[in-house]
Image (cartoon, rainbow, N blue to C red):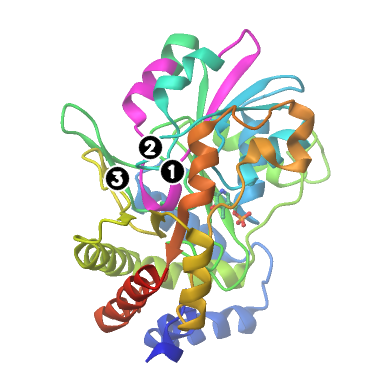
Amino acid sequence: MANSIKMVDLHGQYLKIKDEIDQAIQEVINTSAFINGKPVEAFAGELADYTGAKYVIPCANGTDALQIAYQALDLKPGDEVIMPAFNYVASAEAAAMLGLKPVFVDVHEDTFNINENLIKERITSATKAIVVVHLFGQSANMEPILEIARQFKLKVIEDNAQSLGSEYTFKNGNKQLTGTMGDIGTYSFFPTKNLGCFGDGGAISTNNQDLAQKATMISRHGQGQKYAYEIVGCNSRLDTIQAAILSVKLRNLNKYLQSRIEAGRCYNQLLENLFQVIRPSDNSWSKHTYNQYVIRLNKRDKIKDLLKAAEVPTMIYYPSPLHLQKAYAYLGYKTGDFPVAEKLCHEVLALPIHTEITSHEQEFVINSLIQSINSL
Ligand SMILES: *Cc1c(COP(=O)(O)O)cnc(C)c1O
């Protein structure tokens, strides 16, 4: 039993749809249209249908998606972009590559998402956009963020790499999928995301036709007519084989999300009376899709080692906040600037969660966790 517990189980997921996937890949090989083959456009249409976004532009990965989004929004060197300090590196990196200035904001300790109450104090005359990162499968609190953006005329980019299929509920009861509430949503199809391909993949979504056209052009070397380069762009394409795989997997996405949600609920129950562990909060405004199940606890590193010895894999997302990373030292932040993000980095531990995990495996994980805590 212990040997079989995996952080993710991509192979087990593949085996359940093997025939369809194999056939989809074989069809691409048969046509050999490996770049910009028909499945790429087909998948873009299907993802647009799924999300309700008017336009979906596929690209090579979720980091490129952010860079293309910044460029499509016409952000210029020196422009400031607000984003959470407790975060994957991509939104800061893509900004820095374009000469934009990442401006960090602390997060909520119960949801790990950007603290909307701390955004206004970071806004200056150079601020042009807010990147909302929906972390671990849960929506940030969008309604007040969209209101701040309206008030200060800022663009909103939703980094939805981890939360495709998650929903936000507005105060009036309306529900909307993450990635579709701001000006642009960005997606990653890295294999472990809610919708993952067999390599790298990404996309951006928008309801704005001008942004869609611009993003398309940027992702194709800034090309309008063939060999006519109107703006500086890049080369960022979704491979045809990946698109064909994604179409098959998108048909199963709701089932995958349901498995994740059930696994999340199972952990919530198993941890209910374990006072040493803080469970991820499932707040009223978001449907949590548990791309990751992240708990908080003391002596995290020791517990992680003990779990490893018990053959229970875990991961730390994230061990260090962005403002204390060497690459971003030039921004001039110091320890203490974002106390919640810094604290979380010492406490967070991601437990195994994926579409194939069984409740028996989850019981084993939690029993091992309890034993580890009791042995300290
Ligand atoms: C995975 C991820 C990305 C980047 O995705 P890639 O496809 O690996 O470039 C961006 N932002 C967040 C929050 C992510 O989790």
- Report, in whole angstroms, how far the alpha carbon at label 2 lies from the one at label 1: 6 Å
Q: Which residues are magenta?
A: 123-148
Residue 373 drawn at (x, y percent)? 37, 68
Question: Tag 2: Cα neighbours inside 10 Å, few (<14), some, or many (≥20)?
Answer: many
N-terminal-most mark, 1 or 3: 1
For the residue marked with disc 3, what is the amino acid? Answer: Glu
Question: Tag 3: Cα neighbours inside 10 Å, few (<14), some, or many (≥20)?
Answer: many
Give the side of residue 134 with respect to residue 74, left or right.
left
Residue beneath label 1, please? Answer: 134
- The answer to whether mark 1 and mark 3 are in CB contact below 8 A is no
- Report, in whole angstroms, how far the alpha carbon at label 3 lies from the one at label 2: 10 Å
Q: Residue visible at 40% across and 21% down?
A: 117
Quadrant showing the C terminus? bottom left
For the residue marked with disc 2, what is the amino acid? Answer: Ala
Residue 70 drawn at (x, y percent)? 64, 32
N-terminal-most mark, 2 or 1: 1
Residue 190 vs 87, above or below: the answer is below
Q: Nearer the viewer, residue 372 or 240?
A: 372
Q: Residue visible at 31% across and 57% down?
A: 276
Residue 139 vs 98, above or below: the answer is below
Dot 2: element: loop
Is 327 covered by the magenta stretch? no
Residue beneath label 3, please? Answer: 167
Residue beneath label 2, please? Answer: 140
Q: Nearer the viewer, residue 238 or 10?
A: 10
Residue 192 drawn at (x, y percent)? 50, 67
Residue 147 vs 249, above or below: the answer is above
Mark 3 or 2, closer to the camera: 2
Dot 1: element: loop
N-terminal-most mark, 3 or 2: 2
